[in-house]
Image: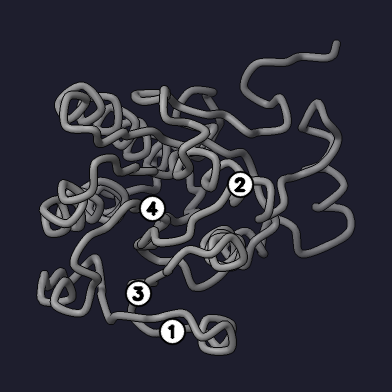
Amino acid sequence: MRFEQKNILLIGGTSGIGLATARLLQQQGATVVVASRKPSEEIKELGIAHVTLDVLAFDRAFTADLPAELHGFVYFPGSIKLRPFERMSVEDFMQEYELNVLGAVQCLKAVLPLLKKPTHASIVLFSTVAARLGMPFHSSIASSKAALEGLAVSLAAEYATTGIRVNAIAPSLTATPLAQSLLSTPEKAEAAAKRHPLGRVGKPEDLASAALYLLSDESSWMTGQILRPDGGMSSVKLF
């Protein structure tokens, strides 16, 4: 996969899966722009362009610093707030929805004119295995990410004739800073690995490779799909 002369915007790509995606895209020749509240040291070291954006205090002025056209867009923001349903407030659900869905909606509405300029463009949204597989304590995350999957397939239908493709990725637990508390001891890490049929949790590079595929011309006949690189969690039971 080569990305020369392609401009890719990553929303929230400063660590974990986003950083791995930025690094791979840069290696493949893409011009990468990361939009987040502040750049990480890794993004600075890679020399990747950064624009300031807080998706919870949205200001579309960030688009002034973007290239004249975009060939790809990836929305990474999410959270891991695992709590019993009875301890969650309506405000907790609203915060998840604002981060996962409304943040993506506002970003997409702001950059859609730039995505329409090339002949073909690709939008990639990040969901979670919990949007399909019932898991305890995931009610706020699962419901908002399920809405994001609905957004993906709806937009895929709406923009199919324009050359814009829209797909989503629904990973299981991945070893990122966001998931650090769930993998903080050898015992936790071993238990998490055993819950997956393939016997390990995800690596950022696993999901970055999936994102690159969906952004690339190799996936030019794919839209409205939810890829599930989750170690078999959502579809395989060994015993």
Do the residues bearing badges 3 and 1 touch, measured as CB atoms within 8 Å?
A: yes
Q: How is the image coloured?
A: one colour
Image coordinates of residue 102 in percent, x first then y, are 19, 50
Image coordinates of residue 20 in percent, x first then y, are 61, 63
User: Label 4, on which residue?
Assistant: 74
Query: How many numbered marks have been drawn onto this rendered protein structure?
Result: 4
User: Label 3, on which residue?
Assistant: 36
Along the horizontal axis of the image, is 111 left or right of 143?
Answer: left
Q: Residues within 10 Å of mark 2 (few under 14, many from 20)?
A: many
Q: Amino acid at mark 4?
A: Val
Q: Residues within 10 Å of mark 4 (few under 14, many from 20)?
A: many
Do the residues bearing badges 3 and 2 touch, measured as CB atoms within 8 Å?
A: no
Sequence-first disc among 4 and 2: 4
Q: Amino acid at mark 2?
A: Leu
Along the horizontal axis of the image, is 190 left or right of 111?
Answer: right
- Which residue is nearer to you in this view: 60 or 24? 24
Callout 4 secondary element: strand
Asked if residue 228 is positioned above or below residue 9 in the image, the reply reads: above
How far is mark 4 from mark 3, CA to CA? 12 Å
Do the residues bearing badges 4 and 3 touch, measured as CB atoms within 8 Å?
A: no
Callout 2 secondary element: helix
User: Label 2, on which residue?
Assistant: 207
Callout 1 secondary element: loop
How far is mark 4 from mark 2, CA to CA? 12 Å
How far is mark 1 from mark 4, CA to CA? 16 Å
Displayed quadrant of residue 51? bottom left
Q: Quadrant of the C terminus?
A: top right
Label number found at residue 39:
1
- Which residue is nearer to you in this view: 157 or 201? 157
